[in-house]
Image (cartoon, coloured by chain):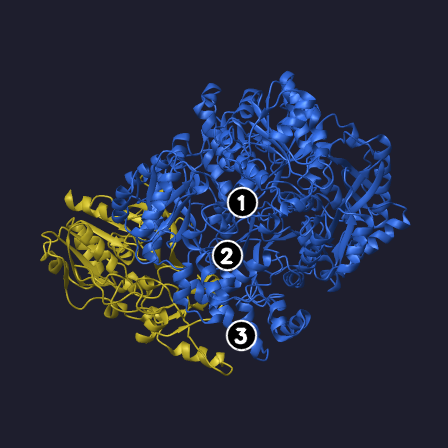
Chain colours: A yellow, B blue
Amino acid sequence: MVGYTEALTDPSYNGQILTLTYPLVGNYGVPDPTIKDDDGIPKFFESEKIQIRGLVVHELSLTASHWNLTMTLDEWMNNEKVPGISGIDTRELTKKLRTSGVMMAALVVSDSEIDVDSVKKQLSSAKHYDSEQFMDEVSTKEVQVYGNDEKTVVVIDTGAKNAILRNVRELGYKAILVPWDTSYEKIMSYNPEGVVLSSGPGDPQKCPNTIETTKKLIENNIPTLGICLGAQIIGIAGNTETYKLKYGHRGQNKPCINLENNQVYVTSQNHGYGITPESIEKSDFKLWFTNADDKTVEGIKHKIQNCVAVQFHPEAAPGPFDCKFVFEELRKLMEK
Amino acid sequence: MPKNESLKKILVLGSGAIKIGEAGEFDYSGSQCLKAIHEDGINSVLINPNIATIQTDTRFADQVYLLPVNAEYVESIIEKERPDGIMLAYGGQTALNCGVNLEESGILKKYGVNVLGTQIKGIQKTEDRQLFKDSMKECGVPVLRSKTVNNFEDAKKAAEELCYPVIIRVAYTLGGRGGGVAYNEIELHEIVERGLKASLVKQVLVEEYIGHWKQIEYEVMQDYDGNNVIVCNMENVLSMKAHTGDNIVVAPSQTIDNHEYHMLRSAALRATKHVGIVGECNIQYALAPDSDKYVAIEINPRLSRSSALASKATGYPLAYMSAKIGLGYNLSELVNRITKSTTACFEPSLDYIVCKHPRWDFAKFELVNRRLGPTMKSVGEVMAVGRTFEESFQKAIRMLDIGNDGLVLNRSNGKTHTEEDIEYKLSHHDDQILYYVAVALKMGISVERIYKLSTVDPWFIEKIQNIVSTEEKLKNSPLDESLLWQAKKMGFADKQIARAQDKTPDEIRDLRKKLGVIPSVKQIDTLAAEWPAVTNYLYLTYGGSSNDVVIPDDEKGIVVLGAGPYRIGSSVEFDWGTVNMVWGLQENGEKHVSVVNCNPETVSTDYDICTRLYFEELTQERILDITEFEHPKGIITCVGGQTANNLTPGLAQHGVNILGTSAHDVDRAEDRSKFSAELDKLHIQQPRWQAFANLNEAKTFAQEVGFPVIVRPSYVLSGAAMKVVWSQEELKTYVKEATDVSPDHPVVISKFMLNSLEVDVDGISNGKEVVIGAIVEHIDSAGVHSGDAMMVIPPWRLSNKIIETINEYTKKIALTFNIKGPFNLQFLVHDDHVYVIELNIRASRSMPFVSKLVKTNLISLAAKAILDKPLPKIPENKWQKIHNYGIKVPQFSFMQLEGADIALGVEMQSTGEAACFGNSFYDALSKGLTSVGYNLPDKGSALVTVGGAQNKEKLVPAIGKLKQLGFKILATEHTAEFFEEKIGQIEIVHKISEPERKPNISDLLYERKIDFIINIPSTSTLEKYVGMLDDEYQIRRKSLELGIPVLTTIELADSFVKTLEWLRDNETTKDPIEPYDKYE
């Protein structure tokens, strides 16, 4: 029920039609996209634009009420030319996705009877999600620098959320955002204390350059934190395997257990791929977090080197702040 | 951490009788706690004198003590039972306070009893205002700022520092009198000066005023290891202005964004960790409407009304999980009860909107102030589930069972308002506030203006606008498929649509079905359909295109209708009936029993009780929807009080199979003319009565039989609009009132027989055999409503001959009306004659009392009767052979109701009851009186004020005895004169209305020099209206506010004094109750 501005601008959702299980959407409107914090990072949004291809909701609130809004959700989507549909039984749709897995879809509205077969035909000839090259679309083209602290953390942008940058800044480091395919040497030229591999959309195998870079980061024991897609990339670089989940983990209420102290945390998640649990044993990693519900891999730590990764989103936005301490883990590695 | 293996026996404290602020939600939480303990093979002992609860059945608890929940009684049970642990979080504030007392007096330590769950230290950190503020500051959670001042200059400084508006609270006055809200310096000056004068210590508190802030609540679970999750958050529609118990509440919150949601969430987790909550707690915030500023208002370190609501709203059984945590489990070890595969350490996601609406019963109280504010006044609540706010909200209004079909398009909405009037109403919330918002919108007052006045967030006002616009469209457009869908999605009932379209509800229903406009059945599954969940927890909505479940042919069963919201006259006893009916049916081989109910404070809405639970409206339209979906074998309407009973004829007409007594026979009993004709045939007497539609005939009749007379409508429970009338003038007023409440049924006037005894009989019949549960005698004389009267089994003033007659009449009547199931008969005994007052063919208020004392579960027998099974052979005088005395005592909640008069009459006013058993009448009574809050002093002073010579005469023995026992007797001049003559010296005191004369009652009350008061109001209610009795009213009200017991009937005063005498030489017994006898 909360977090639609954050979710819609999360690059991990690029190329997807998003449906929300909560039936009432848009109640508190949309804040001003031009407001930025002191470092020039947009204050309320996770990227420069709406990333999703379409939105499916049960009821769209045409009026909104909040002290911080400048427009309604409807106006925002209209401004950004992103289509949406309301009046849908989203619970029924969720059940369909739950049983059949995520699927290609089309949004069709018409005053007359819809010819489902022809829509399906059109859909089958459309470019499939799996064959999209997301990195071209979501990753920054130029290097961007936030803050002017002495020490630096490089964030490799495979579709980074602004919240990751905000959290790096909160640690007291300059954040340098670099394109997804930046080489190890180029990264080291910034003389970073540590590196963050960001979240992002799609299959980690589609980022071979990032995987290569990561192998070198690990080899040279550069303090590294991976988040979501970044975690999968680190996993592959350290000999784990990855797989596509049937319908992914998406939401703000996913319980994860920290195996080091047996504490349970509620985490924000958004991923369609994961690290294969059975592959951990033969890899360079040990298990750090596991999902309390389905025991999937939620976090790994390198057995020797300064490298950690989490499948969930410690940077929140949307979602709970319970796992902000993960960034503190990075700090510890950097200050070791 | 796994379960604590050292635990063998656990004591659980209940909350006692139902009162405003402590209602049926604690039957839910206590029952779940006992269930959780039982599952782990640990013994449990329960102390709770609330006999009408499920938890006091010996099903979940191993030992049940119907005893007062106070340190003295609890200690004696601890000494006897020697438990290893004690659970304090499941019996409301009563249990919590008792726990703190037990700790402070060293009793827990003395017997080595461990507090399970939140420790006493944690409880104190949340209960003590200063400790709370300190702890919140320590963990970085802001709290309200305030300053204590002694003069205006300091107050001004404080107000400027805090920023206007500020609220001024006066130290040491009752009910917040003398304080107020100041928006500027001028107002501040006035209020502070007034306040300083009113304060005994010349001190006022200046505090930030946040009435217009949003009121947001979070429910937190935390285990011994510190793992914690938020189970639910809620938003109060009426902002901080109204107590959350009197607020319309939605879950989840609707108008806060991601940042605010998680800011408050994190603060909740920080705060609960810091104070050391183990189990469940509720944290309440105020959040600014124009920034992300917030303060924590309070933490409830226990299960609460909000947590019961959160449990039902999410499907997460908070009380059960909390108890498991108390036993030592940690959150990740516990399993989600709905999915049965995922962990309980998660935060439920909802895909619907829940709306809770309070049920008020102001009409029952004379002189009561209806304003909503910081003190809770509602007596119950409902919860509606839908997929739009409009749908949930209008459903909730219907669930209240107050005669409204929704927010708009109600029957006889003839009231008109001026704009000025409405603007005042918008800024002074009462129980009608959202109706006024609708009226304001129709008048064209802007959303912004309405928000400014009412502090209801514009988002909610816009939703009400949607309802108002749809009404407009329904009135002015032809009804096509799309308009029907729109109206149904906006929560309109067929009745409302019919009214707008000038059609009948049946016509609308037929049209809807023809066009396929029917609701979908959806599951409440804690995870918004993300995982497969086998859940039987259901609701109906028009915001869907398909059903989540299908009913296989072999699962067609029986549907039991619950009782809806708790209110005066229909309380937890009907939930006890509903749940016992489900169990009774199951025990008699019915595998599939569904329940429909809409009250979140109940055990019947726990989804593990039945095959399918519909959290739904108890309206004809919705029950028909459910039967068309379920195709049940039949429906049971006789255990859900009058709400369910009233649906019988309509459902029967629509072809629904009513199980139990036929609709035809129910009608024969409810229609007074038909009922009377049947009694005549049986040669059974009844007080003279007649039905009227016309006032003049009524007047003539009243004159003929002589005043006083009783006026009432037929088909109404708990004496709504039932009055004893003493004059022609009053008759006129009440005949009108009675016709308003029940316009479709005639008004009945009967002779009111003074000085007679009232008797209740609870029984079961299967049409061939009749089982009489017991004959119950009212201790108070007729005229006090049966729900307010003290009752005793066995009767102590009835001769054997009378008892025989009552037995005989009961059997005759039960067979004549072909009763199949439970029934209740009320008799009047006058001059050795037995008269029948009324027959209720349904479960009654006293059935749990009778069942537990006589050890015969009447509802379980009713299940057999309904299923056409033979009834067991139970000796007719079984109830007479019980060695115990059982006494049921009413609980009143007048303290909460500013202005309400506590004198009793034919309108029921009690909110609950307690019952205790004993070896003698006084053994049972002394425990009963203690249970409902009477202090039984062994010395001190009693004030006696009695109206009417007859009353005075009757009281002579009691007052004499009191004096003999060494009590000092105080009385006003006239009364003193009368008693002095009979029993010797009386101390004279002066009326409150003559403050210059000393000693004055007012001073003595404040100085606590009076221990209890015998105040028998003059029987003539006429005097009340000419204001002659204002002085007596003042005494009653003041003593109430000071917590001094007031005895307002002769019988109560008499029994009270005799109990004091008995306690001189006797000690009360402390025995557990015995389980029900088993019958095949």
Q: State whether residue B266 appears in this view.
A: no
Quadrant of residue A270 within the rendered picture: bottom left
Residue at the spot x=72%, y=54% of the render? B715
Mark 1 = which residue? B899
Question: Sequence order check: which comes first, mark 1 or mark 3?
Answer: 3
Residue at the spot x=27%, y=46% of the render? B156
Quadrant of residue A215 within the rendered picture: bottom left
Residue type at numbered disc 1: Gly
Looking at this view, name the residue that lies furthest to the bottom: A112
Mark 2 = which residue? B355
Q: Give the structural element (helix, strand or loop) at label 3.
A: helix
Residue at the spot x=80%, y=54% of the render? B672
Q: Position of residue A298 (x, y in %)?
A: 33, 50
Q: Where is residue B488 in the image (x, y as percent from the top left)?
A: 56, 69
Q: Give the structural element (helix, strand or loop) at label 1.
A: loop
Mark 3 = which residue? B472
